[in-house]
Amino acid sequence: MLAIRLTAEPERLDTLILPVRPGAADDAWAESVPTAVALPDGIADEVAVLIPAARSRGRAGDVHTQVRPGGVPRRLLLLGIGGADEAAWRTSGAALVRAVKSETHVTIALPVGVAPAAVRGLIEGLLLGSYRFRLGAQTDPPTLTDVDLAVTDPEAYEQAVNVARITARMTRLARDLTNMPASVKNPRWFAGQVAEAVADLPGVTLRVREPAQLAAEGFGGILAVGGGSASGPRLVELDWHPADARTHVVLVGKGITFDTGGISIKPVPAMKLMRKDMAGAAAVVAATLGAAALGLPVRVTTLAPLAENMVSGAAFRPGDIVRHYGGLTSETTNSDAEGRLVLADALAYAVAELNPDLLVDLATLTGANAVALGTRTGALYSDNDQLAEDLLAAIRSAGESAWRMPLPTDYVEHLGSDLADLYSAPTQGGGSVLAALYLREFTGDLADRWLHIDMSAPSWCDRDDAELTRGATGWGVRGLLRWLAALD
């Protein structure tokens, strides 16, 4: 990641970034912003001329460049900051890092009295906007390595910088895990990546159940979904348990490392990106590691059921009966509705063995999520109004998007099976809603403290946009960390 340094006395001004804000009138040119450090002689006058010449309106993410051969600075950039809130600064940081990727070092002169939240947004934008994932021989890495943030009192922003760095690092970790192709990524590999990450974080414990342990303990859903693959399933259990924790949260994330659809096989276009079908597991693992790195005073246990849904003679079939952890059974109507089978095991285990105060799961569960809400918004389900409101607020403040969806009781009858306790995937429509209702059946006494997010659509982005880069987005990490930080 970029090296970002707070300083009251910048030593290098070869590339200087100055923020500008929208003018007072809608059609006015941008206005310069008083900065925390003195500018070189003549720069203020030059900016006054450059703003109308560049036709700058000061919108968040607008970047205008002036090259000054032989001068100091040799390159001057005007950075639009829009409304100057955290979200605007995040957008501006991402736009800036793309505009200066050929530089090695830049200095950003921040406004006088800039809020710590704005600095946090700027840093997240810089670190997330600069993310790239590529395995080819020609990686063409950006040259920018160092960013100085010029402020009046560096100590006042140290906490915001630390939180932003950790949040961005964990979001990038989730992106890395999700972007990795299935030729590398299988359940064993994923569990190994978690083990490597935990090694650097004291106070975090890890248990990985392999197929024999899963069978001995009755995790029938995970075993059924993973049974068709030569790469056996796993259940990752990760625990951050600080001594001062007063609340225990269990996070569950769907971890299908590749999804062919099984015997109900997907068409090729739908299968190509199925390496992203473990984005929920990546998000909850990264959020738990982030909680530990930040030292948050909340106990977080993460369960990541991992399996590869493949086609073979050992693959489970539509019509099979699966017995889940705890004894409930599912009639599997569609082997391409496999994620809910592994989540059901993990949820039932959390309720029976972990006794959490709150239970939250994230899953790339249905295509219906995108049909209902588009490509940027997760579908959130819960019967608990306060839990839903708190998590929605955290998600939005972090720059992500979710929308609360209904859990209609009259749909529950569609889950009924003649052979088993439940149909895994009823065909009556409302696919994302029915999937949520199915999962709720495994939450037992915690049904009123459970929340589910179907985040298939926002887990992936087809183009660079603000702090998002093409590929995996790491959706959910930022929102979960905000929420965990706010818990009592």
Image (spheres, rainbow, N blue to C red):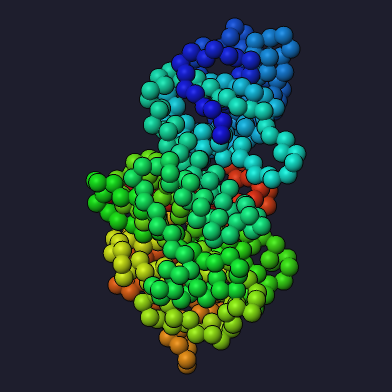
Q: Which part of the image, by quadrant, shows the N terminus?
A: top right
Determine the residue positioned at 42% across, 33% down. Answer: 162
Q: Residue furthest bottom?
A: 418
Residue at the (44%, 81%) spot, across then down = 323
> Residue 411: x and y, percent?
46, 81
Q: Is residue 44 left or right of residue 253?
A: right
Question: Which residue is more in the foreground, 27 or 358?
Answer: 358
The residue that appears at 65% across and 69% down in the rendered structure is 260
x, y percentage for residue 66? 70, 20
Residue 345 quadrant: bottom left
Tag count in the figure? 0
State whether residue 154 is above or below residue 317.
above
At 26% across and 49% down in the image, what residue appears? Answer: 245
Answer with left or right where residue 258 lies relative to residue 206. right
User: Where on the picture, by quarter, is residue 104?
Assistant: top right
Does residue 170 appear anywhere in the picture? yes
Residue 456 visible in the current orientation: no
Horizontal and vertical percent position of residue 157: 41, 27
Percent x, y of residue 98: 66, 34
44, 4: nearer the viewer: 4
Front position in the image: 11 or 295: 295
Q: Residue furthest top?
A: 41
The answer to which of 340 and 68 lies nearer the viewer is: 340
